[in-house]
Image (cartoon, grey):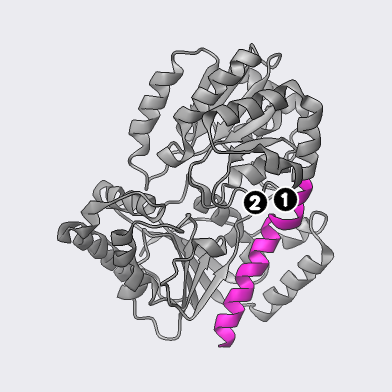
Amino acid sequence: MLQKVSLGVKDIDKYRMLVSSELMDELQTLGDSLKGLRLCHINSTPFGGGVAELLSSHVPLMRGLGISADWQVIRGDQHFFTITKSLHNALQGQAYPLIKMEATQRAYKSNNLANASELDPDYDVFIINDPQPAALRHFCDIPNAKWIWRCHVDSSEPDDATWQFLHPFVEEYDAAVFTMEKFAPADLRVPKIVFIPPAIDPISSKNMPLPSTLWREMLDNLGIDKRRPLTAQISRFDPWKDPFGVMEAYRLAKEKVPGLQLVLVTSFAGDDPEAWDIYAAVNEEAEKDPDIHIFSNLTGVGNMEVNAFQTASGVVIQKSIKEGFGLVVAESLWKGTAVVAGNTGGIPMQMAGGLEDYLVTSVEECAEKVAYLVEHPHIAEELGKEGKEHIRQHFLIPRLLRDELQLVKTLIDG
């Protein structure tokens, strides 16, 4: 059998003080109508990255509504995950000529076939996340089950050869979910296509309020000078997050703001072999400046430390070149911290009102906006307040759960 991630149950009523009563009542009604439903989310890693972050809260909340929900993780060796990371990049537009080779296609399909043979079939609904396990549906014959493919990346301009390879697998699903309408490839034909943005869990350890004494002590323990201004980017180290551009923008901003410090926090995951090479290169570049600090989940920096960095920063950076959504934008704004971010993918939907002026397309623009907000903390504070309210209204996990269960109910009801 595939690995099932061990999770508990979350009480949905704990969110009633954070979102509208109408949303909570709608969610409770949906839960009542689906009580006892057997549902399984499947992805490629139990830790690291946004999907694992989402599922760690999402599945326990489904259980809290009376749904029999599980989370299973596929298996694979480094060769398979090297292929699937290339598929991930290719969906976002990077060329991947190796997908045309029979050996590459055979390795991908044989791994999905092996995982399909180990999949627990005792579910009414399967939700398959991203390209790594996309072919599971093709190799599974489970009578009466409904299948949903959830794409979390910006697939608006995919590499053509890669999409032509994945396309037939995706079209075997009952529904496909994308973050926003422009991400859905124009030639995709499935019975139902819906658009559901991700969301954050406001009461998780990463997003709950931290007393100032606690986050200050945590910064002390990690060697950060609390007396000097701080900026941070928290994301996987891959080319789409542009960590080298972040360091360059930081250096330019530091010319205007002497003493500025930069924290880069990354999270390693089992399905991302290329991260190690980028991590080594980022470390080599960071060693040129003692005020650039590199942390990861492998060096003891977890959700609480990320919370502290996002809370303590004068401004958080998310200088993505391509981005499906960027949960860290919502996380930072939820803490009332202003954000400067790449004007791409799902980021702009989070940066409403005055924050629209802090969507950037270049290193120089990023540096200018970061320096300005660090030098004008009262403006950063106002933007943070505005951003927090926007996240509260649109990007907290009860809304995501409601949207997904509406889709599930539609499929179950036929």
Q: 37 above or below 299?
A: below
Between discs 2 and 1, the one toward the N terminus: 2
Tell me, yes or no, if residue 299 can be seen here: no
Residue ID for mark 1: 391
Residue at disc 2, secondary structure: loop
**In the rendered structure, which segment of residues is drawn in magenta?**
388-414
Task: Name the amino acid type tagged 1.
Answer: Ile
User: Is the magenta region chiefly helix, strand or loop?
Assistant: helix
The residue that mark 2 highlights is: 200
400 in magenta: yes
Dot in front, 2 or 1: 1
Let me know if residue 205 is in the magenta part.
no
Quadrant containing the N terminus in the rendered view: bottom left
399, 115: nearer the viewer: 399
Callout 1: SS: helix
Q: Amino acid at mark 2?
A: Ile
Place of residue 160 in the rendered image (x, y in percent of width and height, measured from the top left): 32, 60
Q: Residue at x 70, y 61 (%)?
A: 398
CB-based contact (under 8 Å), mark 2 and mark 1:
yes
For disc 2, the neighbor class at 10 Å (few under 14, some 14 to 19, many from 20) is: many
Q: Which mark is residue 325?
A: none
Up-down: is 52 above or below 20? above
The residue that appears at 42% across and 72% down in the rendered structure is: 188
Instruction: Please say whether residue 161 is visible from this viewpoint.
Output: yes
Q: Is residue 149 above or below residue 276?
A: below
Q: Position of residue 375 (x, y in %)?
A: 73, 21
